[in-house]
Image (cartoon, rainbow, N blue to C red):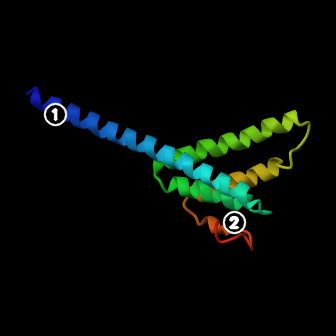
Amino acid sequence: MKLFPGLLFCSLVLGVSGQWYSFVSEAAQGAWDMWRAYSDMREANYKNSDKYFHARGNYDAAQRGPGGAWAAKVISDAREKSQRITDLFKFGDSGHGVEDSKADQAANEWGRSGKDPNHFRPAGLPDKY
């Protein structure tokens, strides 16, 4: 009688811990995907390409699984909120107003939902990206 509850308990613990590990791994890989998209955006320095890189980073991260999608959302939200705070210290707008922030968040959600980030790709952006 005690064997069955023990086996059930162990299987639940092992199952949950395996999922927990997977989530953390996906989140770490998703954070790396976001960093890579940001680095590529900085390297490309291409006009009107930021929405593409937002969508691409979120898309790549979300493809990792629930942990990657979570990391993409947390990083994207933190980035947009930090821009609002830095705008206050710059006594105005950094060129990334509320409208631009909403457009960035729309691109983020587009990518996280699994839609093709090339929808935002500007003409002439090198194929490397």
Q: Is mark 1 on a helix, strand or loop?
A: helix
The residue positioned 29% from the left and 40% from the top of the image is 15
Decide: is 104 above or below 82.
below
Residue 48 vs 35, above or below: the answer is: below
Q: Can residue 67 be seen by looking at this rendering?
A: no
* Residue linked to disc 1: 7
Determine the residue positioned at 59% across, 46% down: 73
Question: Which of the 4 image quadrants contains residue 37?
Answer: bottom right
Mark 2 falls on what kind of element?
A: helix
Horizontal and vertical percent position of residue 64: 47, 53
In-image side of 91 versus 11 (left or right)? right
* x 86%, y 33%: residue: 89
User: Which percent across, then down, holds residue 102?
Assistant: 75, 51
The number of callouts visible is 2
Give the residue type at disc 2. Answer: Phe
User: On the rendered structure, is 21 left or right of 44?
Assistant: left
**x and y percentages locating residue 51 in the rendered image:** 71, 59
Residue 46 quadrant: bottom right
Horizontally, is 100 left or right of 13 in the view? right
Within the image, what quadrant is residue 127 found in?
Answer: bottom right
Quadrant in which the N terminus is drawn = top left
Q: Return the disc, 1 or 2, that comes first in the chain's sequence.
A: 1
Q: Nearer the viewer, mark 1 or mark 2?
A: 2
Q: Mark 2 points at which residue?
A: 120
Q: Can residue 62 be seen in this view?
A: yes
Three-letter amino acid code at the position of disc 1: Leu
Graded by Cα atoms within 10 Å as few (under 14), some (14 to 19) or many (20 or more), the crowding at tag 1 reads few
Quote the CA–CA distance across marks 1 and 2: 51 Å
- The 10 Å Cα crowd at callout 2, few under 14, some 14 to 19, many 20 or more, is some
Drawn side of residue 20 relative to residue 35, left or right: left
